[in-house]
């Protein structure tokens, strides 16, 4: 059996993040194709039990460093420890999530280990024992395929919500090995994380997103989208035009200079479909566009297009969803 494939797991609040399951599932697929095992690295505080859950996704062994000082991601402490473990494991490839922390970690690991990194990949292939990865470039207008020269170790960050989670067995546990690496002294400290406590569904991990653009006309009209989103268990997003107009906060902006999202369903309401917007949502599984202009570019990307005045369509659609939900419950 060849060298292992290694995935780096992410914890938040003592729990494994969903992105870790996605990356582990993808790691397992690659390990199988290379005829190797899958191992993982996890850092955090009180994480041993949870780390073993990675076994469900095919991870055989998890190397953990469990220390209260590692409760939250801090580049200064995480990077040297993870780099040390990777050097010791000498894996065939390393995968992690292209989350905010994951991208930061990946770039630093690449420099420290002197290995080639491809960030934000949406597809990974193994052909004749070689790994090739696909990533969107030029704001998602085209894709680049990358591969590594002979003997180089691929370091790959995977775009969240793209790779499929494949549970092998609910009660399969990974072997957990505690690695004795001291947490380095750091000059920076983690102070706090301001999480959205409004109870709204967050954009980044949302399964469904209802997004509004300039066609919404004014801030108050977003209440219509909030209504629909609530019924669908969706998050509300916005185009830059809506954000620049002050109708929505920048945190809601989807696109090149906003968030990159990958929901199952993206409903674009009164959004024309500019390339910079598509860069943030073009890889959504299903795109629904509601626009009164039949020539709006969004329709060329949409799986379902509704050419209609949004002020007529959205309230009627919301009502139908409400009725459907009440008959189903
Ligand atoms: C460097 C750079 C970065 C950028 N980054 C981003 C980014 O991150 N995200 C982003 O979104 N944009 C970004 N943009 C801006 C982008 O180019 C577009 O200007 C913006 O996406 C347009 O937003 P919109 O589709 O809401 O508005 P518009 O293009 O004005 O489209 C409004 C749409 O609403 C429709 N409409 C109007 N009234 C109704 C109605 N009653 N019923 C139904 N439909 C209606 C119209 O037909 C039209 O298609 C960026 C631009 C640059 C230069």
Image: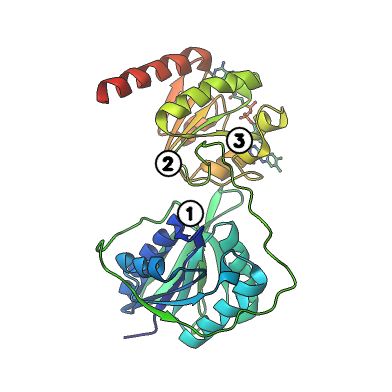
Picture residue at 61% right of the left edge, 79% below the top: 183
Where disc 3 sits, the SS reads loop
Residue named by callout 3? 274
Residue named by callout 2? 207
Cα gap from disc 2 to disc 3, whole angstroms: 22 Å
Picture residue at 44% right of the left edge, 51% below the top: 161
Q: Position of residue 192 (x, y in %)?
A: 66, 55
> Going by the image, does 306 lie left or right of 218?
left
The reply to whether residue 253 is in sight is: no
Residue density around tag 2, few if under 14, some if 14–19, many if 20 or more, within 10 Å = many
> Going by the image, does 126 lie left or right of 193?
left
Cα gap from disc 1 to disc 3, whole angstroms: 23 Å
- Pointer 2 or 3: first along the chain: 2
Q: Position of residue 158 (x, y in %)?
A: 49, 60
Where disc 1 sits, the SS reads loop
The reply to whether residue 119 is in sight is: yes
Residues at discs 1 and 3 in contact (Cβ within 8 Å): no
Mark 2 sits near ligand 1, with its Cβ under 8 Å away: no
Where disc 2 sits, the SS reads loop
- Pointer 1 or 3: first along the chain: 1
Q: Position of residue 155 (x, y in %)?
A: 52, 72
45 up-or-down from 250: above or below: below
Mark 3 sits near ligand 1, with its Cβ under 8 Å away: yes
Cα gap from disc 2 to disc 1, whole angstroms: 12 Å
| Ligand 1 positioned in quadrant | top right
147 up-or-down from 209: above or below: below
236 up-or-down from 164: above or below: above
Find residue 160 and name its label.
Answer: 1
What count of labels does the image hold? Answer: 3
Residues at discs 2 and 3 in contact (Cβ within 8 Å): no
Residue density around tag 1, few if under 14, some if 14–19, many if 20 or more, within 10 Å = many
Picture residue at 57% right of the left edge, 74% below the top: 116
């Amino acid at each position: 059996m060849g060298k292992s494939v290694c995935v780096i797991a992410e914890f938040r609040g003592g729990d494994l993040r969903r992105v870790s399951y996605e990356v582990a599932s993808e790691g397992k697929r690659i390990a199988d194709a290379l005829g190797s095992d899958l191992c993982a690295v996890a850092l955090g505080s009180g994480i041993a039990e949870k780390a073993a859950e990675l076994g469900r996704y095919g991870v055989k062994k998890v190397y953990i460093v469990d220390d209260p000082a590692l409760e939250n991601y801090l580049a200064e402490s995480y990077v040297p420890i993870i780099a040390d473990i990777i050097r010791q494991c000498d894996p065939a490839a390393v995968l992690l999530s292209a989350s905010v922390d994951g991208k930061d970690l990946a770039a630093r690991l690449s420099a420290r280990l002197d290995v080639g990194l491809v960030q934000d990949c949406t597809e990974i292939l193994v052909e004749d024992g070689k790994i090739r990865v696909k990533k969107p470039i030029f704001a998602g207008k085209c894709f680049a395929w990358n591969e590594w020269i002979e003997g180089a170790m691929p370091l790959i960050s995977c775009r969240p919500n793209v790779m499929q989670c494949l549970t092998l067995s609910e009660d399969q546990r990974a072997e957990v090995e505690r690695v004795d690496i001291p947490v380095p002294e750091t000059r920076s400290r983690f102070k706090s994380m301001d999480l959205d406590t409004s109870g709204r569904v967050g954009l980044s991990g949302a399964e469904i997103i209802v997004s509004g653009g300039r066609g919404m006309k004014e801030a108050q009209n977003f209440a219509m989208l909030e209504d629909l989103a609530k019924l669908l268990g969706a998050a509300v997003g916005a185009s830059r035009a809506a954000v620049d107009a002050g109708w929505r906060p920048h945190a809601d902006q989807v696109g090149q200079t906003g968030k990159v999202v990958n929901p199952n369903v993206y409903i674009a309401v009164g959004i024309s479909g500019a390339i910079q917007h598509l860069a943030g949502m073009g890889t959504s599984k299903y795109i629904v566009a509601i626009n009164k202009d039949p020539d709006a570019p969004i329709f060329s990307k949409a799986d379902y297009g509704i050419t209609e005045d949004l002020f007529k369509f959205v309230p009627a659609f919301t009502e139908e969803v409400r009725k459907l939900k009440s008959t189903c419950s």
